[in-house]
Image (cartoon, helix red, strand yellow):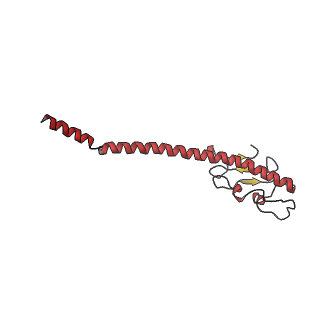
Amino acid sequence: MKYAFAHRNIARRAAGFSLLEMLAVIVLIGIVAGIVVNQVGTNVDKGKWNAGKSQVSKLAMQVESYALDNGSPPAKLEDLVTKPSGAAGWKSPYAKESDLKDPFGHQFSYKAPGEHGDFDIVFLGKDGKAGGENYNADHGNWQ
């Protein structure tokens, strides 16, 4: 009799996990997944913000190239892509249409003449609005 009882307990344990054990594992997986998704999202924003800063430098070089050929910076950034009327020295597209948008999909702010030089290009950050902190902070070509 003792043997039959012991055999039944072993069979019961080998049958699988209880509902409570499975729920605990699912909750733990959910917590870990939430932490991972949050970290990945933060890293994506950081990468886009740093790419936006680099893109400002690239655009500034393209504007300077335009200015060398035409005597002054373009009136608007779109003039880097399409030849404006009266730009006799315009040689070829200085930028692609996609260069005129930041990694978050917003237009760069452009002003010529600028407050900090011949022209100002400003990356407005993740929110696309002036001002802000962290990934919403602005970055200009003079910085």
- Viewer-side residue, 14 vs 133: 14
Percent position of residue 103, x then y: 65, 52
- In this rendering, the answer to whether 66 lies above or below 11 is below
| Residue 130: image location, x then y, percent | 67, 50
- Residue occupying the point 26% across, 40% down: 13
The location of residue 101, given as percent across then percent down, is 68, 55
Identity of the residue furthest to the left in this view: 1
Query: Is 113 on the left-hand or right-hand side of 43?
Result: right
Residue lying at the far bottom in this picture: please name it: 85
Q: Which residue is rendered at x = 46% and y = 45% of the image? A: 33
**Quarter of the rendering occupied by the N terminus:** top left
Residue 88, how many percent across, how many down? Answer: 87, 62
Residue 113 is at least partly visible in this image = no
Q: Quadrant of residue 30?
A: top left
**In the depicted structure, whether residue 37 falls above or below residue 72:** above
Q: Is residue 50 visible?
A: yes
Q: In front here: 48 or 13?
A: 13
88 lies left or right of 48: right
Q: Residue at x 77, y 58 (%)?
A: 80
Give the mark count.
0
